[in-house]
Amino acid sequence: MGRKTVTVALSAEQFAWLKEAIANQRRVWDVLAKMQQQTVAWMWKNLPGMNRRKQLSKKTLALN
């Protein structure tokens, strides 16, 4: 089933509100990504049984 694009005309007030909401959502995603990276890095350092012969790359740890 093909999806169709829906066009909606926003008032200036609605546009400003939506623009701010989208910017806020992007900031939340950035903070959550950083928290996830820190959690994974902490986990690999501190949890027992997490020793590896070969170090994981930053890409694997999502630290890039």
Image (cartoon, helix red, strand yellow):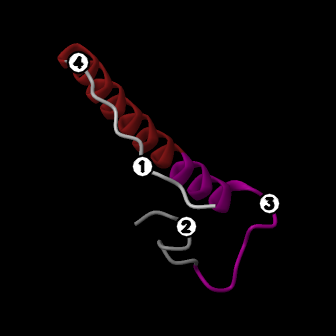
**Residue at the image point whose x is 48% and y is 73% from the top:** 59
In the rendered view of the protein, which quadrant contains the N terminus?
bottom right
Q: Residues within 10 Å of mark 1 (few under 14, many from 20)?
A: few
Disc 1 to disc 2, how far (Cα)?
A: 37 Å
CB within 8 Å, label 3 to label 4: no
Residue 7: say if magenta. no
Q: Earlier in the sequence, mark 2 or mark 4?
A: 4
Residue highlighted by disc 2:
61
Check residue 21 in the rendering and tell me which mark sits there, or answer none.
none
Disc 3 to disc 1, how far (Cα)?
A: 51 Å
**Residue at the image point whose x is 37% and y is 39% from the top:** 26
Residue highlighted by disc 3:
48
Q: Position of residue 4 (x, y in %)?
A: 47, 52
**Residue at the image point whose x is 32% and y is 25% from the top:** 18
Q: Is residue 58 above or below residue 4?
A: below
* SS at circle 3: loop
- Amino acid type assigned to the residue bearing label 1 in the image: Thr
Disc 3 to disc 4, how far (Cα)?
A: 56 Å
Residue highlighted by disc 1:
5
Disc 4 to disc 1, how far (Cα)?
A: 19 Å
Q: Position of residue 43 (x, y in %)?
A: 67, 55
Residue highlighted by disc 4:
11
Q: Position of residue 44 (x, y in %)?
A: 65, 62
* SS at circle 2: loop
Q: Is residue 21 above or below residue 44?
A: above
- Amino acid type assigned to the residue bearing label 4 in the image: Ser
- Magenta stretch bounds: 36-55
Q: Earlier in the sequence, mark 1 or mark 2?
A: 1
Disc 2 to disc 3, how far (Cα)?
A: 17 Å
